[in-house]
Amino acid sequence: MKIIITLGIIILSISMAESQDIGYAKRIIEKLSSAEFKGRGYTENGDKISAVYISNEYHNLNLLPLNGKSYFQKFSLSVNTLPGRVSVKIDGTELHTATDYLVESSCPSVNGRFQIIKTSRSQIDTEEKFASLVDNAADSFILIDCRDKKNEETDLSKKIDEYIKLLKHSPQIAIKGVIIYTNDKLTWESSTSQNIRPVVIINKELDLNTVNSIEITVDAKFKKNYKTQNVAGFIKGTSGSDSTLVVLAHYDHLGKLGKDIYFPGANDNASGVAMILNLAKHYSVNRPKYTMVFIALSGEEAGILGAKAFTDNPLIDLKKIKFLVNFDLAGTGDEGIKIVNGSVYKDKFDLITRINQQHELLPKVDIRGAACNSDHCLFYQKGVPCFYIYTQGGIQAYHDIFDKYETLPLTEFTDYCKLMIMFFDSITHPI
Ligand SMILES: [Zn+2]
């Protein structure tokens, strides 16, 4: 009996070791964040190339298609893209895209040279000052020096934010564009609409006293009802129970900014995809008791739209989900993990903490309440018990061109994966 148990443990540890092959995770992340995948956005078929790659991995791991026929769940979204020329010159000097400046992703097409009218946040703190600025800036760009912005939510600060919003978006104002001059880190977002005028964010030393003109070229393309897809597969459980465990990770990222710049999104969220594929690799060998469902979602950066498509048209009974975990930002871990919904499902949080302590895996497991900040949110709103887990510490790169494979630490990836396997196994076999 003892021999059999020992043998069992040896076999289990061999399969655990195999399944946390960091090499596999690294290959996935390197691949998904390479130039070939175009930042996994909606130009040059970035999303489709990524979806095909993930579906091939599902196939190799013997996952079954969740809808019975194909791994793809198609849906459409509207998105503004900047697939062509993007360039900005200030007084004839070309700025470096994505390191010196960004144009907001909602940017419309524009091509021309414009005069710059300068102001600062403190100079637009009354309606009179705001009105006289606008009157004097017809056909020009307004540069707002935001370096004096304090991180305080005063009424005045909110009022100035409202004026800036009007400058950016109001059709009643005759200006050509807006420049936000800042010393904050440049961070890009995705946009599902196209603005009426360009907004340029500059973080580069300029002599504001002499700044006079901007030459800007942007080729924008608004894509209405662009077809994209979630990628969903499963491994059938051995128990015959119709309950499921679900793991999610969004595979989309911000795509490209012009022809040359792409956003690699190694941590956000090639790392999460690597996590669910690593789990799939483990459970394809160690068949789970409950059916395990693996969903790589599109459209997260555009407003958790892949999760919306799935929860509006679920391919499985949402009521039968025993537990769901969303992995988004899985690539660091120097300061452990944080668990959104940890205080909502405290018994599960305590379970993870206990396993982590027993096996001395991650340096820290932090708790957080509910937050609608990633894909799990729409499942949670439909009553699905779930966590969203992200790693902490390590790198600062986020929604910029520096979120790349080469500098992603993956400090705790192996232990993180072990912890999750033991967590799912403990749900299956309560201690
Ligand atoms: Zn993300």
Image (cartoon, grey):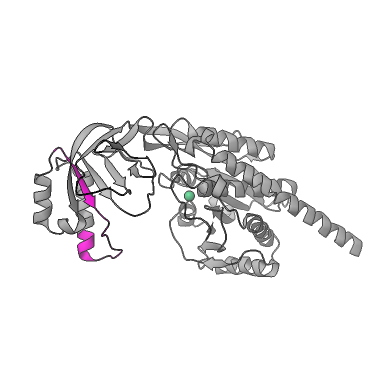
Front residue of 69 and 183: 183
Please indicate whether residue 21 sits to the left or right of residue 103 in the image: right
Front residue of 385 and 135: 135
Residue 90 is covered by the magenta coloring: no
Can you say whether 203 is above or below 223 in the image? below
Q: Quadrant of the C terminus?
A: bottom right
Q: Quadrant of the N terminus?
A: bottom right
Please indicate whether residue 74 sits to the left or right of residue 240 in the image: left
Front residue of 373 and 238: 373
Can you say whether 24 is above or below 110 in the image? below
Read off the magenta span.
Answer: 139-159
Q: Residue at x 39, y 31 (%)?
A: 83
Q: Residue at x 64, y 49 (%)?
A: 292
Question: Splitting the image into 4 quarters, where does residue 5 fall?
Answer: bottom right
Count the marks: how many? 0
Q: Is residue 287 visible?
A: no
Can you say whether 27 is above or below 148 in the image? above
Please indicate whether residue 77 sits to the left or right of residue 288 in the image: left
Picture coordinates of residue 296, whole percent (x, y):
55, 44
Residue 146 is covered by the magenta coloring: yes
Picture coordinates of residue 281, whole percent (x, y):
69, 46
Picture coordinates of residue 173, whole percent (x, y):
14, 43
